[in-house]
């Protein structure tokens, strides 16, 4: 170091610092004496009178209706018991007196208070959903229960016969993480928040806005009166939501899937609204609203059938033969073959040393594209798959919005998987995967995975020849304050770059699936309405095949698309198609004006 | 080696200052616990836990600061300064904001407030510059560079906007220059334009300040040209200020105005001060007891766990608690002044006086503001107010004291 020795700091400089420190300290202490000694009684009086407390008023959560105005989710009044810690401390036997009235021991109550203590004057919730009898008993003996009272905290109830538990979701107490994520909204510990489904995704609409009022409290923190000034901030109740669901279709769909595992989705092709969205097994939403007992929660968590798992948007499945339609579209649109191109099916196809079977051991004989769709011939599609190739097949799969999320307004949607060359290279190594894998993909097996929601959207795309709307559940929002309804209009979208001719040919094949002599889905027929579709019987590593059906109707002017999936149900034609037929019939019974064209005379 | 040196040089005064620091932090934690346990707290005891967490980080950095060689601080002074300037720029570009002002940077889940760290970094850089150029301090160019070194972080912090912290620099820079031997007159003339800028919000204060400038120039009897140049400079600053002003966003303007006391907001700052005074005054001699202050527990005070934390102490622990806090600060500051006076090495003496000045400013302005005798400038109380970056900065500062004290014989 250079000469960094400090020339002696002049005494005046040092004294300056001592003087500033001394003077500042003197002034501060003088001020303290002035405030805390000389004027302490004045200030004590002011602080005693300064007992204006801000009280948050909780808004009522919005209700949820179906498309016809049937109530799906309602609010049910419930009382929560609270106590003020200050009073509990002053009256040690208060715990005992409360415990005598409710189903809790004094020790439990004490623990609750210790865990939730946020200041002596902040009331603590001791119990939710207290019996009405307890409320009246304690209210009658008010004077014995200083600082004890009730808050009205409604819980959800479900008046409809349609459960729609995965759609509607449920509420739960807000967690610390949720508090931190939502700092722009005034959540408080103990508030409820949507945890799943519509309750979660439209939380902000349903919740409403808390109000504030200023309450004068006495020396014990008890509310004396509500002040007019400062003016209170009015509560804004939550908005009511009208869903696209039809509670009757939803209910019948649920009944059809009773005791089964799987999913049914029906979509209104005029706006993409979902008429029913079923995942089975489901749960009783009432059991999950309000206080959830550990017994109920454990039962749902550890049920081997996973009732909390949403099989309509979250689970992914191999689509089986329903996916042959993608390959057919690609083949025609790319002019790989003409629909009249035919092969001879002997019940199996040999590629190299491997033999790939058709589902019909004795074979389909000589068939063209229409018949191959109608009868779901594997051998035909094996050969078509080799002609079209993986990249084109994957490209068309993506055209039909498969392998990505549909954007439905429900949380936790899965994207599924559509393998392409890049995917296969990454999964199996470059050049390590075989043409045999393409054969599997051609019939909807292999690494391909879809959700049922994606498949109903796909059926709709074929029905409307490329025109579609984003699938959704919200139809309109009603604001009870302004008495105004705001409709949720979905934008009409369109897939370009696929010729109408390709649609016409594939749709004709689908018409034959239901209406042809050898069709695999004859059980999906509906009297008076021409329905088209495709069955699927998907092999899977977890036992029996999954039964699939996708379809739409009426054929000429489609109004509704449907998908039925029965996990491990067996054949699509036998297990899935009849359920679809029954629901389509119900739909056209409910909406006779939508049946459009009549079945051509035979 | 270090332990040997520690045993030899670690004295009673060093133990004392560490205990003082720990006592202040403990008082802070108790007050934060009481202040944030209220009904509308989304954090519940989160703030308390976070502060403990930051205290842990602070202890690690404190020990690190104590154990490093003082020469290293001198060598790295400009590097640290550069990093902090980049961080301050990053805050302006992509900082996360609370209440309209962007002050935080998030790195791996931790939120930093670079403006707090900038205080120490700037003190290092200034001390280094004053040491390297100690024989050329009457050179105009060097004085300007020096002022620039101090004003650059200040302006970046001002722009956030965080006026309370920005003003700390306006005190630290001249104080360190003065300690290094720059004459009061030169200091006055160097920092006059900043004063002019603040004064020019009102015609009469502007005229008044110009009057002061003229009289000083007259008394010291400098040349006509010299005097004229300074008057022109200050008038230009005064005239340019309105143009700079219009380039600020409306909310920034509002903050500046309310800071200068030029807008009346009964529910805002003055409400805060009144409630703070009521809280302290009603505490009386012994206080209302831990967690039993009605002002605190019924949340009459906004920001009571940050800048206004002293009012919680005043209400719940009375004048006894307050005097203990003041006593602890006086201990700390006395040690700082004494150490800075006794250290022989220029660099470490300057750093010590810079840090002491920072504490002195925070101590007197924060307490003055909470008791209603100073304007409200948004300034935390060291060791006690909630806020991780500032707590860690303060603990590092004490680490520097202890380090220099241990090494005092060698440098």
Image (spheres, helix red, strand yellow):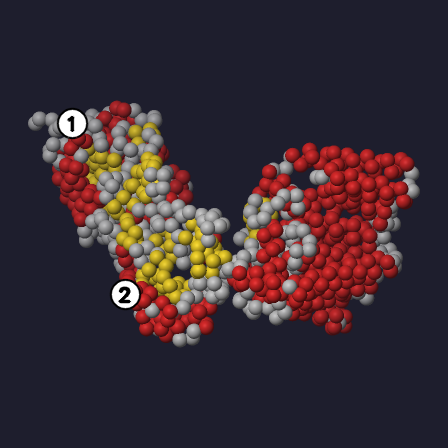
* Depth order, front residue of B67/B393: B393
Question: Looking at the picture, does residue A469 appear above or below residue A202?
Answer: above
- Which chain is indicated by disc 2? A
> How many other residues sit within 10 Å of disc 1, few (<14), some (14-19) or many (≥20)?
some
Q: Is residue B86 left or right of residue A509?
A: right
* Residue B273: mark in rendering: none
Which residue is drawn at the image coordinates 29% and 54% (left, top)?
A76
Instruction: Mark yes or no: residue B335 visible.
Output: yes
Pointer 1 indicates a residue of which chain?
A: A
Q: Mark 2 highlights which residue?
A: A133
- Which mark's residue is nearer the viewer, 2 or 1? 2
Q: Name the residue rendered at 38%, 50% in the picture.
A: A59
Pick the residue in front: A162 or A262: A162
Residue B80 seen anywhere in this rendered image of the structure: no
Query: Based on the displayed image, in which of its 4 quarters is residue A528 positioned?
Result: top left
Residue A84 rendering spot, x and y as whole percentages? 43, 66
Task: Specify the quadrant that holds the N terminus of chain B.
Answer: bottom right
Picture quadrant where residue A153 is located: bottom left
Q: Secondary structure at mark 2?
A: helix
In the rendered picture of this protein, how many numbered marks are placed on residues? 2
CA separation in Å, label 2 and label 1: 61 Å
- Labelled disc at residue A597: 1
Name the residue: 80% across, 60% down.
A19
Residue A487 or A400: which is nearer the viewer? A487
Q: Residue at x 30, y 64 (%)?
A: A136
Specify which label sits upstream in the sequence, 2 or 1.
2
Question: SS at mark 1?
Answer: loop
Q: Look at the picture and state if B125 lies above or below A123.
A: above
Place of residue B9 in the rendered image (x, y in percent of width and height, measured from the top left): 77, 70
Q: Is residue B190 left or right of residue A462?
A: right
Q: Position of residue B116 (x, y in %)?
A: 65, 53
Q: Residues within 10 Å of mark 2 (few under 14, many from 20)?
A: few
């Amino acid at each position: 170091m250079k000469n960094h020795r400090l020339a002696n700091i002049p005494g005046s400089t040092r004294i300056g610092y001592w003087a500033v420190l001394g003077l500042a300290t003197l002034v501060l202490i003088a001020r303290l004496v002035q405030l805390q000694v000389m004027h302490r009684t004045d200030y004590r009086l002011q602080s005693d009178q300064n007992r204006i407390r801000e009280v948050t008023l909780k808004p009522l959560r919005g209700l949820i209706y179906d498309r016809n105005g049937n109530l799906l989710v309602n609010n049910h009044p419930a009382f929560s018991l609270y106590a003020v810690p200050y009073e509990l401390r002053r009256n040690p036997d208060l715990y005992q007196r409360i415990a005598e009235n409710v189903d809790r021991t004094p020790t439990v109550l004490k623990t609750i208070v210790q865990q939730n203590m946020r200041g002596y004057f902040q009331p603590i919730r001791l119990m939710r959903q207290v019996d009405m009898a307890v409320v009246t008993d304690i209210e009658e003996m008010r004077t014995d229960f200083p600082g004890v009272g009730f808050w009205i905290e409604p819980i959800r109830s479900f008046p409809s016969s349609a459960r729609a538990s995965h759609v509607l979701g449920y509420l739960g107490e807000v967690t610390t993480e949720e508090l931190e994520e939502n700092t722009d909204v005034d959540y408080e510990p103990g508030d409820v928040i949507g945890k799943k489904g519509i309750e979660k995704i439209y939380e902000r609409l349903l919740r409403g806005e808390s109000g504030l009022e200023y309450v004068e409290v006495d020396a014990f923190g008890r509310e004396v009166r509500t002040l007019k000034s400062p003016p209170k901030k009015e509560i804004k109740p939550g908005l009511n939501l009208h869903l696209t669901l039809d509670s009757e279709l939803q209910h019948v769909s649920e009944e059809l899937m009773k005791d089964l595992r799987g999913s049914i989705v029906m979509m209104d092709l005029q706006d993409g609204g979902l008429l029913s969205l079923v995942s089975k097994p489901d749960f009783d939403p009432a059991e999950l609203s309000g206080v959830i007992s550990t017994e109920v929660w454990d039962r749902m968590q550890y049920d081997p059938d996973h009732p909390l798992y949403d099989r309509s948007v979250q689970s992914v499945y191999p689509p089986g033969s329903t996916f042959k339609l993608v390959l057919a579209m690609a083949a025609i649109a790319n002019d790989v073959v003409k629909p009249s191109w035919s092969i001879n099916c002997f019940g199996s196809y040999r590629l190299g040393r491997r033999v790939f079977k058709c589902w019909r051991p004795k074979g389909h004989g000589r068939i063209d594209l229409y018949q191959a769709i109608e009868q779901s011939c594997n051998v035909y599609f094996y050969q078509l798959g080799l002609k079209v190739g993986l990249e084109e097949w994957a490209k068309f799969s993506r055209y039909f919005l498969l392998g990505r999320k549909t954007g439905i307004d429900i949380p936790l949607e899965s994207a599924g998987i559509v393998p392409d060359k890049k995917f296969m290279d990454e999964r199996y190594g470059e050049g390590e995967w075989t043409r045999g894998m393409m054969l599997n993909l051609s019939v909807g097996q292999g690494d391909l995975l879809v959700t049922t929601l994606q498949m109903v959207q796909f059926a709709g795309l074929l029905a409307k020849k490329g025109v579609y709307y984003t699938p959704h559940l919200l139809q309109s929002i009603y604001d009870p304050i302004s008495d105004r309804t705001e409709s949720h209009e979905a934008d009409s979208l369109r897939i370009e770059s696929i010729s109408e001719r390709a649609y016409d040919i594939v749709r004709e094949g689908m018409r034959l699936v239901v209406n042809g002599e050898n069709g695999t889905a004859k059980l999906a027929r509906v009297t008076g309405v021409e329905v088209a579709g495709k069955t699927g019987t998907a092999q899977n590593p977890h036992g029996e095949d999954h039964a699939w059906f996708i379809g739409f109707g009426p054929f000429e002017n489609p109004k509704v698309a449907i998908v039925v999936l029965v996990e491990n149900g067996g054949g699509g034609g036998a297990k899935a198609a009849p359920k679809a037929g029954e629901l389509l019939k119900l739909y056209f019974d409910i909406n006779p004006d939508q049946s459009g064209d009549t079945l051509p005379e035979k | 080696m270090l332990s040997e040196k520690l045993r030899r040089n670690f004295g009673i005064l060093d133990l004392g200052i560490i205990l003082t620091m720990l006592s202040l932090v403990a008082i802070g934690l108790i007050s934060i616990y009481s202040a944030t346990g209220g009904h509308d707290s989304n954090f519940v005891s989160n703030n308390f836990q976070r502060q403990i967490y930051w205290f842990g980080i602070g202890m690690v950095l404190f020990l690190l600061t104590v154990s490093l060689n003082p020469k290293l601080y001198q060598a790295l002074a400009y590097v640290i300064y550069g990093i902090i300037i980049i961080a301050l720029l990053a805050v302006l570009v992509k900082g996360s904001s609370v209440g309209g002002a962007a002050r935080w940077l998030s790195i791996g889940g931790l939120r930093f407030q670079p403006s707090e760290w900038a205080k120490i970094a700037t003190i290092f850089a200034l001390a280094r510059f004053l040491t390297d150029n100690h024989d050329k301090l009457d050179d105009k160019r060097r004085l300007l560079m020096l002022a620039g070194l101090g004003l650059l972080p200040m302006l970046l912090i001002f722009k956030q906007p965080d006026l309370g912290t920005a003003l700390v620099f306006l005190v630290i820079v001249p104080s360190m220059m003065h300690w290094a031997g720059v004459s009061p007159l030169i200091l006055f003339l160097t920092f006059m334009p900043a004063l002019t800028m603040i004064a020019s919000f009102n015609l009469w204060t502007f005229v008044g300040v110009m009057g002061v400038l003229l009289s000083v120039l007259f008394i010291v009897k400098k040349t006509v040209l010299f005097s004229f140049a300074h008057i022109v400079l200050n008038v230009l600053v005064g005239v340019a200020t309105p143009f700079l002003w219009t380039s600020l966003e409306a909310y920034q303007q509002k903050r500046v105005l309310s800071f200068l006391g030029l807008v009346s907001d009964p529910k805002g700052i003055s409400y805060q001060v009144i409630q703070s005074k009521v809280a302290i005054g009603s505490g009386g001699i012994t206080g209302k007891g831990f967690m039993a202050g009605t002002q605190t527990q019924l949340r009459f005070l906004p920001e009571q766990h940050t800048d206004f934390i002293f009012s919680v102490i005043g209400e719940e622990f009375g004048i006894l608690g307050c005097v203990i806090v003041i006593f602890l600060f006086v201990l700390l500051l006395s040690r700082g002044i004494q150490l800075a006076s006794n250290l022989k090495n220029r660099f470490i003496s300057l750093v010590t006086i810079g840090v002491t000045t920072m504490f002195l400013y925070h101590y007197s302005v924060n307490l003055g503001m909470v008791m209603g005798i100073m304007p409200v400038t948004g300034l935390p109380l060291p060791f006690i107010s909630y806020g991780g970056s500032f707590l860690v900065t303060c603990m590092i500062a004490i680490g520097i004291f202890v380090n220099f004290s241990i090494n005092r014989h060698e440098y």
